[in-house]
Structure formats: C-alpha cells, structure tokens
C-alpha cells in the first residue's frame, strides 16, 4: 500500500513514517459512519455540542507541545507562529461553543396565523437544521487553523454535521496526530480522516456527503467544485481559493509616513514566507514611495516554503514575471541556502502598463512576492479597482486630508473584496462575529459565505419550516415558551420572546 | 425576426401578437444597462427602495383588470385565482418594502477591538451588500407571483440588485404588459426583460450577471445550473425545480376523518389543474382510505393545462405509469372536451412495491395526478421517508393519540422537505418571515435558500467587512450611532444599539 510521506522543508529530507493512503472502500466506510452518526449528532442539544467543542479545544491545548513540534518539522513555519496558530484554532472552537450557547445561529422565526391577508398565512415556524455529513479539505499553509481541527471542521461540527477531513499531503504526521486527539473527544462516526488525492475525489462524489469545505489553490478548488456541481445531486462547495489582496497607498499617507508604510507592507508580505491567503501581493503606490518599499523588502528575510512544488512555482512564476518585461524587479530579500527556501521579491510596473496587462499582472504568486503599481494620479487607480479579480481583502492607506478619496476607494473595493482595511495590513484574520473571510470568484467559489468567524457556521445549515404543528411536537427552538431562551424573530420582530 | 406566440389553452388557438425574440446584442445591451444602474440602485437608501417597491405594487394593482384578463387568456387559470395571485404578488412587494424599513436584512455586526486575544481582533464591522445584476427566469404556472414581478424579481430589487427577466414562453403578452408597468416605475436600467430560449442562455453566460433565479422544470433548471456553474467565474444559481410533496395520513386520522382528509387531498391535488410546485403527488395512506380517496378524485374536475407540451407530457406520463403495471389507476375525474385539458387521476401502489421501485414511482407528473402508497404498518412508511428525493413540502395527518408517530414522521421528513405541514395540505405558499419554500435537490439547486418569504432576499446579498475605518467613512448601517436605528449585533449581542 502506498503512503503519504511528509518532508522537512528546511532540509528537503523525509520526516516521519508515510501515512497509508485511504482506499475507496475505507472512504465509503467513513462516509457511511458519518451518515450513521448524523441523526444523534444533529439532534444533540447545542449546549451539549458546545461542551464537546470546549473539550476538544482543551484536549488540543493539552497536546500543544508535541503537535507544534511535529508541525514545525513538516512546515518550517516556526514554533512561535505554530504555537499561536494552535491557540487560535482552539479559541475558534471555543467561539463556536459560545455561538451554540447564544442560540441565534438557528435563526428561529415564529409567525402567527393571519387568515385575512392574501395569501392567507397559517402558523409558520422556521429554524435552521444541519445539512448532513461534510467533507473538509485542509490547507497546506495553516496546519492547524485551516486543517484537521480548523475553521471548516469546527463550524461544521458546531452546526451538527459530522466531518470527514481530507488531510493535506504536505503535513501527514501533523494531520494524523491532530486527528487522534479529535477522535478521542468526539462520539464515534462524527469525525473521520482520509489521506491521498483519490480519497478526496471519492469523498466529494460520495452520496452521503452533503457539502464540502476547501482551502487551497484556484486550480485544485475549481476541479473539486466542478466535481461537486456535476454530481447527479449537486452539493454546496465552499472553496477559498486564490487572492491578490490589493492595497492602495494614497499620496498624502505616502508623504507623511512612507517609511512606516513600507515597513508594514514588507512585514505583511514576507510573514510566513508569504504563504498567507491574505498576502498583499498587489500594491498601488505613488512612484515616490518605491525607494522606501524597495529598501524594506531588500532588508527582509525569506525562508523555507511549505513544500518543494510551492517553492518551484514561486521561483518559476517570479522568474517568468521578470522575463516578461512587463514588471521590473527592484528589490530582493535574503533566504537561507539550505532547504526549499525562497527570497522576498519586489516588482514595479507603471499604472499605464498595468491597465493594459491586468490579467497577467494579477496572477497570484504564492509566496513573498509583491507587485507595486506606481501611479501619479489616484483617480486612475480608483477607476480600475472595480475591475480587479475577486479578492479576500482590499486595503487603503490614507491620511485625514484624503478621507474623501479613501471613501471612494472603499466604495470601489466593496464589490470585489470581502474585507476592506483602513491604515493596516491584511494578514492576520481575527476569529469573530464580524469577520468576513470570503469574496467574489476567484477568492472563493461562493461570495455569500465566509470560512472564518461566527457566521461561517451558516454554510452547513438549511432552513426548515413547520406549519401548524402542535407546540409540544416542535423542536425546543420553536416552542412558544422559548424554553432555550434564545434570540428569535416573533411576528416579524427580533427579540428574546 | 421570429417571435414568441401566446396561445389560449381553452381553445388551442393563438392569442395576441407574437412578441419578438431578443437578440444576443439586445441581451448584452440590457445586461450592460443593469450593470450601469447597479452603483446607484445598490446605494439608494433602503427606505427609498422601499418607496419604489410600494409604488410598483400600487401600479400593478391599478392595472389588475387588464393584466388578469390577459393572463387568463394565456393561462386559463381563471379570473378569481389570477386576481388573488396578482394581489399576492403586490403584497409580496409590500412585504419586502417592510423588510427594507426594518433593516435587519443587512445583518450588521459591530465588533470592538481586542488586542489581547489570540489572534488579536481589530475593530470589525460587517454588513451585507447586493451582488450585482440578477437574471430571473419566470415560471409558467404563476404568471404573476413567480414571473416578471414575482418573488425572485421583488427580492432581488429589494436587495439592491437590478434585474433582467427571461419571460416564460407560455404567456408572452402577460409578461410584456407586466414589464411595461414595472419599467414605468423603476429608474432606467434597473429592470429589463428578454424573450426566447437563446436570450435566456445568453443572460446566464453574460459577464455582468452575478446570480440567477429560476422556477421551472428539473431538466431546464439543471441545464441552466450547469451553465452558471461552468462559467469561467461561476455564479450562484437558485433554481426551484421538481417536487413530489409526500403526504402521510396516519391510521387514527384516516379512521376518524377519512372523508374530510380525502376531500382535502383531492382539493389540493386538482387545484389549478394540479399545476403547483407544492401539489401533493405522493400520498401514504392506510389501505382502508382508498375508496374515499378514489371517490373524491372521481368527483373532481380537471381543466385546461398551461400549454400543449405540459398536457402532452401529463398524458404520456400517466399513461406510461398505468402501463407499467406498478401502479393501478383507481379513479379519474372529469375534464372539458375542448382545449388542452387534463383529467385528475389517482393511482395506488402497495408500500412493498413502492419500496422496490422508488425512483420510478417518485417521478413528478406535473398536473392533477396522485399516487397513493397503501400501507398497513406505519413503521414501514416512517422508515422510507428519509430516502425520498428532496421536496418542497412534506405533510403529516395525525390524530392526538398518534402524536408520537407524527413527531417521528416530522423528524424523518426534516432532512428531505423544506416545509413540514401538520393536518393541512401543501398548496398555498404564504409570503412571510417564517416561510421556507425550498428543499434539498431536486426540489432546488441549493438547500440553503428559499424563493418565497422575507429571507429570500438573502440570496442576492454577500457580506463585506470594514476593518478599522473612521466612523464617518462607514455606510450608515455600520456607524457607531446607528443613525438608521436598525437591529444589529454589537460585540456579540443582538439588539438595536
């Protein structure tokens, strides 16, 4: 039987034992087990699912040391970053536990009967119910927060959906060790994990699977989206794909605090060797800011990338860009000699050239590479923002005197970006009620949904309306006395009746 | 230039002048006009869009006489039903106006900064924004409520999205006259209409169109869903397709009020010549109830169907079913001789035969045909409910002594049906906050959404989060003082802060 072998990116040497790939028969057994676990998991009171999510968070925190050590060997992301990432992952589980206890996530609606309107209204009570077993494809660049016990898994479990994870091939040992902790806390069948590309395909096509979450490349995500959409019974596919994350530095901000902006940009660009989906790969800046930007990137350090393929496509992508003659390489940072390392690179291109070569120049180069589009007239930049490809974030740097321009930039960005940032940088995605980590294609496969934050749970829930049922036969969320004390909409009015 | 010709189903003769089909160039111009109108329509304050929706409702009511007359000639649905349907359509517009004024539909969320948690949280403010121009495919069977000014159009306009309607070929004059009223009320570009199959295809593929609403057949809906999903930039496609709407009559209810149940069933089955998406085509009933059901259906009257193709497929579908030997034709109602008429038909099949031929026996026969699955042991019925195809509605008739069984039936139905009805019938879809008119495939292409009711507006909205923006640059929905006074979630708590 073949296996998924992990590697140490700092040396390029194998790390750990290969993890056996999952056969189609094993995928089927896991999906069927998830289906069998669905009735009990989906009807467990939210407060009890919350207890289990809290327990899972505690169990992962208790294993933080060995989990982080394994992840660091397989990803080279460093112990401090990975320690923080695991804490972020467990805090995410605790946020969802809180969401379950608060209870408004089921969006309960109670309408009294009204026989006199047209059409007449019977008594209607609406609530959200979980969809069924969910497949989650984990990401390479966040071995905890977007992987086995990451946001997709946590939100689906919170919703009441069993989860089968397709682990990422770049960190099989981290996946297996995390899965062991998850499985030890949850009831049998509620969680499963598979290894290998074919197992992922089998999962998306499996009749028991009712929805898919995915974080990864545009190519891989599109292939799986097409698979999910072309099933005899199409299922929702929530993919977070590529993003260039445009940032605009307006003229007065560039003049007033050029060095600070340049340092902030370079820090955001090279963080985690640029392997963030919110990496600011496209910067619109006054021509005068280029020297400061180049200085900051020259002074920055790269490092080992997550795997050899990524390093290779970073190299070939940035070399092709330099060779294209469209953009000029103006700065390069440092990188260690050994391992699958990459150095930060900064390119510039005048806005006039960008306008004519938009498609080529908005290709994402996953890694610490940035393209600065230089401009003299901000109106020219504002005019082209709405035609940028869909993106997770858009950033504006402005001084108080140019708030009018900043508001125009926000208006221009809001049709293409999921999150619009003022005088800060896009890397770092808070886990909160107000977070939106999504955006129009190709940022995601569905602009209505987020993969981070409290509202990400909505992806795994569908409405059901009960018409004229006796009160005692209704789910507690919908009973007249509101026994769970949750926020509800009663006769059109939001409240806690 | 070819045209779309309407017909009078009562005679089979042409009605009215053919309406010219829309060329690809005209489709492009309408989609571009919608795109051009988007910035102003989407940023018009909700209260002002509400005024226009109310104005549109009043304008349609004022034209009720001639609109209903035309629709009756093209659909044969009758003046009383069509008068009510138009009123339902205008009340729907008024409901959405109310939703805009209440303001919670934008789901505003305000989170304060918290630098101490992991990961640190900046100030985040989330709101829903309209997607962009929407294509709406209108239905044959509701020439007002699911057509030019119907639910998809009304909800998309309410959301702030311009709409281009693909009219249904069965009622071109009704569509054109309704479109004239709509266009007279709305700003230029906010509403357009196209005619002809190819124009619909061009619309779904048009780069300016950001989402599609559809009500119609499973085959037609699937083809357009595939088109939307295979675009270079896939767009959301909300299709309401076929549905068999299973109903279960439990034994004590059948004994206690068999005649009443039989009359209610037959009434729901033949209403509008069975041309409702919520038509109860599949009834599970004790064997003893069959004579009463047969009597009620024999006494019922059919009528002219909407068009010749529908009448033909009703005939061939029900004849094939009778010829299959799987089900027995036990009753047939009456129908007028002239025109494209169809008579109600009732079939029976023992539950044992149904279990072995589920796929064949859950095919929808659009029209007044019902299949009664006869049973002696209700446990057998409960066991097969979860494996039924996705459906808009599921119905349970129960007497107080069998409430336990009824609750089990509801639990079994909630994974397959969008609305679960107690001791009533599924036809008649109220327009309300609590309505869910949706369900798993093939009832719809996306189980998360409804095409009727206040929450149908959610289909046309996507989130955007503002991070750390100065208060005065934010949309009013997100400003600290809550100038619009709308319900919001502030620091995790729902309220009106």
Image (cartoon, coloured by chain):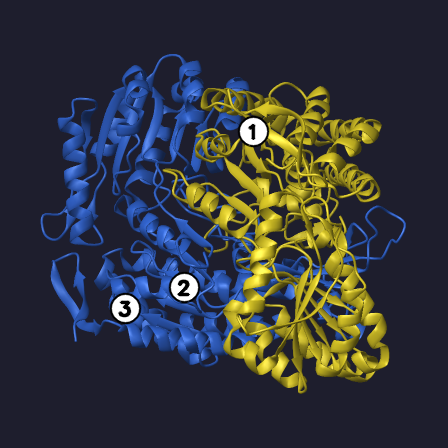
Chain colours: A yellow, B blue
SS assignment at label 3: loop
- Chain letter for mark 2, please: B
Residue A158 located left or right of residue A264:
left
Q: Residue furthest front?
A: A337
Residue A373 to residue A19: above or below: below
- Chain letter for mark 3, please: B
Q: Position of residue B332 (x, y in %)?
A: 18, 33
Whole-number angstrom distance, CA of label 1 to CA of label 2: 41 Å
Counting other residues with Cα less than 10 Å from the Cα at mark 1, is it few (<14), some (14-19), or many (20 or more)?
many
Q: Are marks 3 and 1 on the same chain?
A: no
Q: Position of residue A289 (x, y in %)?
A: 76, 78
SS assignment at label 2: strand
Which residue is nearer to you in this view: A357 or A394?
A357
Instruction: From the image, state whether disc 3 or disc 1 is nearer to you.
Output: 1
Instruction: From the image, state whether disc 1 or disc 2 is nearer to you.
Output: 1
Whole-number angstrom distance, CA of label 3 to CA of label 1: 50 Å
Residue at 41 percent of width and 64 percent of height: B135
**Between discs 2 and 3, the one toward the N terminus:** 2
Residue at which label 2 appears: B135
Q: Residue furthest right?
A: B116
Residue at which label 1 appears: A195
SS assignment at label 1: loop
């Amino acid at each position: 039987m073949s296996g998924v072998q992990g590697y140490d990116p700092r040396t390029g040497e194998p790390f750990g034992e290969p993890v056996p790939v999952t056969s189609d028969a094993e995928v089927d057994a896991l999906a069927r087990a998830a289906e069998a676990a669905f009735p009990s998991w989906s009807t467990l009171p939210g407060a009890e699912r919350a207890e289990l999510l809290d327990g899972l968070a505690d169990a992962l925190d208790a294993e933080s040391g060995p989990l982080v050590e394994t992840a660091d060997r397989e990803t080279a992301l460093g112990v401090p970053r990975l320690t923080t990432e695991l804490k972020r992952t467990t805090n995410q589980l605790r946020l969802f536990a809180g969401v379950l206890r608060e209870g408004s996530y089921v969006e309960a609606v109670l309408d009294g009967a009204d026989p006199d309107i047209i059409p007449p209204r019977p008594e209607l009570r609406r609530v959200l119910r979980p969809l069924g077993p969910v497949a989650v494809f984990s990401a390479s660049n966040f071995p905890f927060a977007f992987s086995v016990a990451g946001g997709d898994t946590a939100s689906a479990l919170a919703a009441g959906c069993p989860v089968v994870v397709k682990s990422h091939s770049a960190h099989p040992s981290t996946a297996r060790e995390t899965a062991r902790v998850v499985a030890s806390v949850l009831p049998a069948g509620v969680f499963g994990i598979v290894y290998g590309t074919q197992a992922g395909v089998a999962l998306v096509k499996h009749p028991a699977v009712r929805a898919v979450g995915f974080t990864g490349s545009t190519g891989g995500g599109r292939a799986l989206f097409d698979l999910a959409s072309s099933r005899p019974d199409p299922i929702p596919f929530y993919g977070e794909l590529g993003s260039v994350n445009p940032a605009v530095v307006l003229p007065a901000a560039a003049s007033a605090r050029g060095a600070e902006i340049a340092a902030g940009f370079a820090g955001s660009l090279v963080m985690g060797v640029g392997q963030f989906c919110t990496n600011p790969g496209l910067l619109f800046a006054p021509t005068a800011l280029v020297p400061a930007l180049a200085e900051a990137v020259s002074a920055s350090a790269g490092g080992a990338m997550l795997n050899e393929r990524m390093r290779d496509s970073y190299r070939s992508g940035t070399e092709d860009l330099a060779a294209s003659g469209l953009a000029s390489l103006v700065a390069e940072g440092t990188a260690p000699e050994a391992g699958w390392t990459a150095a930060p690179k900064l390119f510039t291109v005048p806005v006039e050239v960008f306008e004519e070569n938009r498609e080529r120049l908005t290709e994402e180069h996953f890694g610490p590479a940035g393209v600065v589009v230089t401009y003299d007239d901000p109106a020219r930049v504002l005019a082209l923002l709405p035609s940028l490809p869909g993106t997770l974030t858009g950033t504006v740097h402005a001084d108080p005197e140019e708030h009018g321009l900043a508001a125009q930039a926000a208006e221009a960005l809001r049709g293409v970006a999921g999150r619009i940032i003022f005088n800060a940088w896009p890397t770092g995605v808070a886990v909160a009620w107000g977070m939106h980590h999504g955006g129009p294609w190709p940022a995601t496969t569905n602009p209505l949904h987020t993969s981070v934050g409290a509202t990400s749970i909505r992806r795994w829930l569908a409405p059901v309306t009960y018409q004229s049922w006796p009160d005692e036969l209704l789910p507690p969320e919908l009973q007249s006395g509101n026994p769970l004390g949750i926020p509800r909409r009663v006769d059109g009015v939001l409240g806690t009746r």
